[in-house]
Image (cartoon, grey):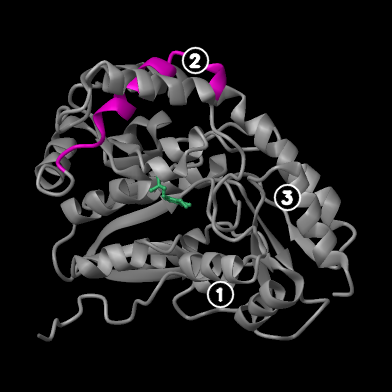
């Protein structure tokens, strides 16, 4: 039986590939973004208790009402909004699913979606599987700031959505107040464009900068699907839990798709998260916790010839190897796994064109000893 592929150009993701290679070569894995330290024991116990208490059947399709209520209280306080947990929030299978479900809700065949590259790898397939057309804009290296004139030039009557991601994976760039002003004035002129905002790293933002959530800006929030991830916030990427926030009418459409997609998310985890959300410090302290790791890793990397391209958020930092080699980044990354025992992600994987600026993405959400050991390996005779 032949299946005509809806995604003929997509193979195994680079994250899976590099993680496999890391295991094969017994390498330290700074490639795929996941912590190698334990998540909160208290949160684990809350899930266990929720299961023991019988929370093991389908919860509400939109998410446990108490969890949505607590999330509404959280974002209303943090971002000075008036999100309604009943109508404006849906619990999803991680941030990726929130983005996919939002794009599936919005897109009709032939619709154009503006995507900034380097981009998280799920965006383009999410658009293409829905018959949409990605319109790619390259963020200039090394600032990775949005070139607004180019965005304006690429808007057409078919533009249906713009995807933004701050803090950005893989560059670690974050939106600045000027970006918000630009976005507001641009969208004011184009009432048909929906914003899909990937804010999974909302609590991983450094150097005292506030997270400029789209939810803070009423005119933008009124036309946005804003996507979040518990996995990033609570060090449990394997839980694949997240949520999406949008105005009630948009969220109603999102839910039409969601109820025949995942239908709902794991019940005991939602009960536990609703309780754990009362602990504000668990997320408010995350930025300084992760900033220490960024700074520690940077310090350790001083013994190597790799040069950091400063990250202001997320748990990634890119490093240039231009002073070490002229090899294409994929080849160079393969060499590092095999010869040095360190797995990283070559940045060209985040561009459809494979643009190669001789950069590698490192994940620093790791124990200090892991980061120190990786830097030591990279320092030895590179
Ligand atoms: N968006 C971005 C920018 C990400 O980096 C990730 C995770 N790597 C996700 C979404 C996915 O989040 P989740 O694991 O909750 O699906």
Residue 279 is marked as 2
Question: What is the distance, in whole Å, between disc 3 and disc 1 at their CAs?
Answer: 25 Å
Left or right for 26, reference 175:
right
Query: In the rendered view of the protein, which quadrant contains the C terminus?
Result: bottom right
- Whether label 2 lies within 8 Å of ligand 1 gets the answer no
Task: From the image, state whether disc 2 or disc 1 is nearer to you.
Answer: 2
Label 3: few (<14), some (14–19) or many (≥20) C-alpha neighbours in 10 Å: some
- The residue beneath circle 1 is 348
The residue shown at (26%, 41%) is 223
Magenta span: predominant SS is helix
Task: Examine the rendered structure and indicate whether residue 256 appears above or below residue 13.
Answer: above
User: How far across and down, in percent of the image, does residue 358 sit?
Assistant: 68, 76
User: How far across and down, in percent of the image, does residue 25 sit?
Assistant: 64, 71
- For the record, the magenta segment spans 263-282
Q: Secondary structure at mark 3?
A: helix
Earlier-in-chain disc, 3 versus 2: 2
The residue shown at (20%, 79%) is 5
Residue 370 is marked as 3
- Whether label 3 lies within 8 Å of ligand 1 gets the answer no
Query: In the rendered view of the protein, which quadrant contains the N terminus?
Result: bottom left
Earlier-in-chain disc, 3 versus 1: 1
């Amino acid at each position: 039986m032949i299946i005509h592929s809806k995604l003929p150009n997509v193979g195994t993701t680079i994250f899976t590939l590099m993680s496999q290679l890391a295991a094969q070569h017994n390498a330290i894995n700074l490639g795929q973004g996941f912590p190698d330290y334990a998540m909160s024991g208290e949160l684990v116990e809350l899930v266990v208790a929720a299961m023991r208490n019988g929370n093991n059947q389908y919860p509400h399709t939109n998410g446990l009402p108490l969890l949505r209520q607590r999330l509404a209280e959280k974002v209303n306080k943090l971002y000075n909004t008036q999100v309604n947990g009943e109508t404006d929030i849906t619990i999803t299978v991680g941030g990726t699913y929130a983005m996919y479900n939002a794009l599936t809700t919005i897109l009709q065949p032939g619709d154009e979606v503006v995507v900034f590259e380097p981009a998280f790898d799920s965006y383009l397939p999410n658009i293409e599987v829905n018959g949409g057309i990605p319109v790619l804009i390259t963020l200039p290296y090394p600032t990775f700031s949005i070139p607004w004139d180019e965005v304006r030039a690429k808007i057409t009557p078919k533009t249906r959505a713009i995807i933004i991601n701050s803090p950005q994976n893989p560059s670690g760039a974050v939106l600045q107040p000027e970006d918000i002003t630009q976005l507001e004035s641009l969208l004011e002129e184009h009432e048909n464009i929906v914003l899909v905002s990937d804010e999974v790293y909302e609590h991983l933002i450094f150097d005292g900068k506030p997270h400029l959530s789209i939810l803070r800006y009423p005119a933008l929030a009124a036309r946005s699907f804003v996507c979040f991830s518990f996995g990033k916030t609570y060090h449990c990427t394997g839980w694949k839990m997240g949520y999406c926030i949008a105005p009630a009418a948009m969220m109603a459409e999102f839910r039409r798709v969601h109820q025949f997609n995942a239908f709902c998310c794991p019940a005991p985890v939602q009960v536990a998260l609703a309780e754990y959300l009362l602990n504000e410090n668990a997320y408010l302290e995350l930025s300084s916790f992760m900033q220490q790791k960024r700074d520690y890793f940077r310090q350790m990397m001083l013994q190597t010839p790799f040069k950091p391209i400063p990250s202001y958020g997320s748990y990634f930092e890119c490093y240039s190897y231009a002073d070490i080699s002229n090899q294409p980044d994929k080849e160079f990354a393969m060499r590092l796994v095999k010869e040095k025992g360190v797995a990283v992600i070559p940045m060209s994987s985040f561009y459809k064109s494979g643009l190669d600026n001789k950069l590698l993405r490192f994940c620093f959400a790791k124990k200090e000893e892991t980061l120190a050991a990786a830097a030591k390996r990279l320092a030895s005779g590179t």
